[in-house]
Amino acid sequence: MLPKNCPNFPANRRVAAVVGIIILAVCNLVAIGFILYGLAVFFVLCLLSSNLPVEKDDAIQTTLEWARLAPLPDTAKNIHVESGGTVFTRSLLVRFEAPVQRVTDWTKASPSFENPIKSAYLDVPGSLEHTYFAESGSFVPEDSPFSQKAQRAQTGNKRGRYHVYLLRAGGGAMHAEASIDEKSGEVIVIAFWS
């Protein structure tokens, strides 16, 4: 409060009010700017982390690089690409079908199949939940096809539908795997980066 003996008391009060209004307006503009900036960042992050359709050719090339695989056979058909993850992770899945002999030739031309980390015949194709954690040693879920329980069930004459390979990842990826149905020629490749 201004002292009563201050000259031009009403004028000082007007100046103080105008300065207060200006400060309030600037604060509001700054707050609105932060809110708009936050919303923009939020929407960009949502777009980057969603399962939006990806450029199919780029996703295939990246998957092949991360899994250290040869180009897809020229007879590959029913090619399906999925992308997932967040801003800090990315997983890619490429599924295709080709004649069995072409798939065999493709595996021979791919460096990753020369020395895989592990392989097994399983009833289900590999998945990040089952194989990545088993490979990294952090834990092996009870229902993982690579758990001891599942491996015992696969022994004997019974052979699973898919030959699942844990591959040595390349291109900065943390995990790569391929599941191959050797009877139908279906191939599922998964690569993961974090």
Image: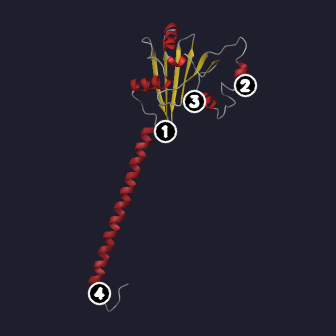
Please, which residue is most extreme toward the bottom here?
5
Do labels 2 and 4 touch, CB within 8 Å?
no
Earlier residue among tags 2 and 1:
1
Do labels 3 and 4 touch, CB within 8 Å?
no
Q: Amino acid at mark 3?
A: Leu
Earlier residue among tags 2 and 3:
3
Residue matched to label 3: 128
* x and y percentages locating residue 100 in the rendered image: 52, 9
Earlier residue among tags 3 and 4:
4
Per the model, the C-alpha gap separating discs 2 and 4 is 88 Å
Earlier residue among tags 1 and 4:
4
Numbered disc in front, either 1 or 4: 1
Per the model, the C-alpha gap separating discs 2 and 3 is 19 Å
Per the model, the C-alpha gap separating discs 2 and 1 is 32 Å
Relative to 87, is 54 above or below?
Answer: above
* x and y percentages locating residue 47 in the rendered image: 42, 39
Residue matched to label 2: 149
Residue drawn at x 37%, y 58% as measured from the top left: 32
Residue matched to label 4: 9
- For mark 4, give the secondary structure: helix
Earlier residue among tags 2 and 4:
4
Q: Amino acid at mark 4?
A: Phe
Per the model, the C-alpha gap separating discs 3 and 4 is 75 Å
Left-right relation of 114 to 56? right
Residue matched to label 1: 86
* x and y percentages locating residue 96 in the rendered image: 48, 17
Q: Quadrant of the N terminus?
A: bottom left
Per the model, the C-alpha gap separating discs 1 and 3 is 15 Å
Q: Amino acid at mark 1?
A: Thr
